[in-house]
Image (tube, rainbow, N blue to C red):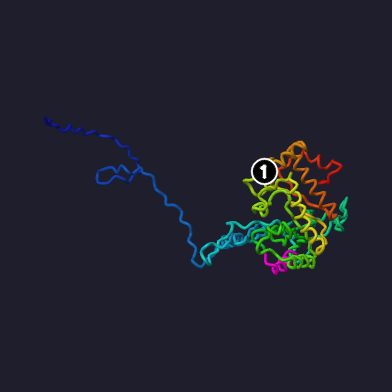
Amino acid sequence: MQRDYKPSKLIDVDIPVPVEENSKDVEDGGIDLMAKREEVRPLPVQQQQPEDHIDVADDERRRGNEKQADIKQPQAPVPNLVKLPTAISRKKGHRRPSSNLAQPLSRSKSANFQPQGKAPPTTAQGLAGSKQIYGVDYPILTTDGNFIPIRRWVHLDLKGGAYKPPYFFQLFAFFKKISANGVVIEWEDMFPFEGKLAAARNGDAYTMEEVEAILLAAKEMKLEVVPLVQTFGHLEWVLKLKEFAHLREDPRLLNVICFGSDESWALLEDMIDQVAKVHQKHSGMRFFHMGSDEVFQVGVCNESLRAMDREGGRERAMLWHISRTAKHIRESYGVSYKCCLFVILSTTTNHIVNTGDSARLA
């Protein structure tokens, strides 16, 4: 529904406007309502400088800021970096770094690093309680007090992948170059055993002439030569054979010998004597390493069970066997012996140290 809208009536209203007496805004009989607007004053305009004018103060300020920006800030010293060796990947010719970051070398270590072919630092002068061991000053310290062992020996385990005899000359020269002063040789089946042990010789075993040449080469390089013979565990090279299988501590395993058996002891004595005699003749043997570590299977064969019952327990029986082995080496060859023990309680060592009829291990 549409509605009609009518416009409202217009009403004329006279509004009086005050007019100043001096007003000049009356024009054509009307009045200008903007006559009272305030006069807008223009902002002061800065006097423009000519193009060739230079503000000295601004120029000097700008140049000073540039000089400060050019001054290099002091940087922290960069430590010496050791370049890690690179490993060759399967792709031919491609090399990748062994690590993403180079390892920092401390200043103390880098300052005392000994070049190849030079002997390590001597004993620190004035050290209280300094003494000599086997004619060598002890202790040996670097200039910053780090300990350097007197005997820096390299272990050569010849089972499985033995070196050809001529290579020993190069090997000993390298050991001397890196400041090593001794080698521990574990011959195992590479030694030219005779008698009953001849059955355990490797098909590529060294001849006696080659063994003597190896020992003489080490002696010429002034390297201490220490023979290592396993006397408890790690005897797989013998016990794997049918001729010696009955001497295993556990018939299912090859590494530990039935130490309570008289036949086992006779075999170990023969093994020690053959190696020790050759070393004593050609290299002036002063030390003997009797291997006795990683003996896990004990108390399986009847002879070992009887030894455990006689000695008063598993650990005491093991120490009894080690004690008689050490006593045999000392009495037969008059040398110091190194013994590697494993899985033996330290509380039972008094049995072997304080027993009058046993060789001391301490």
Q: How many marks?
A: 1
Helix, strand or loop status at disc 1: loop
Question: Is residue 155 at all visible to an observer of this figure?
Answer: no
> Which stretch is magenta?
163-176
- Residue beneath disc 1: 297
**Quadrant of the rendered image containing residue 62:** bottom right
Name the amino acid, label 1: Gln
How far across and how far down the image is residue 46, in percent? 48, 57
Give the side of residue 70 with respect to residue 148, left or right: left
Q: Is residue 46 above or below residue 93?
A: above
Question: Is residue 249 at all visible to an observer of this figure?
Answer: yes
Q: Nearer the viewer, residue 151 or 254?
A: 254
Q: Is residue 52 above or below residue 345?
A: below
How far across and how far down the image is residue 246, in percent? 67, 48
Identify the residue at horizontal 33%, vertical 44% (top origin).
35
**Quadrant of the rendered image containing residue 98:** bottom right
How far across and how far down the image is residue 206, in percent? 70, 65
Residue most extreme to the bottom? 166
| 165 falls in the magenta region | yes
Identify the residue at horizontal 32%, vertical 37% (top origin).
18
Give the side of residue 249 with respect to residue 10, left or right: right
Q: Is residue 167 above or below residue 230?
A: below
Give the side of residue 322 with respect to residue 297, left or right: right
Q: Nearer the viewer, residue 121 or 2?
A: 121
How far across and how far down the image is residue 154, in percent? 73, 59
Q: Nearer the viewer, residue 272 or 86?
A: 272
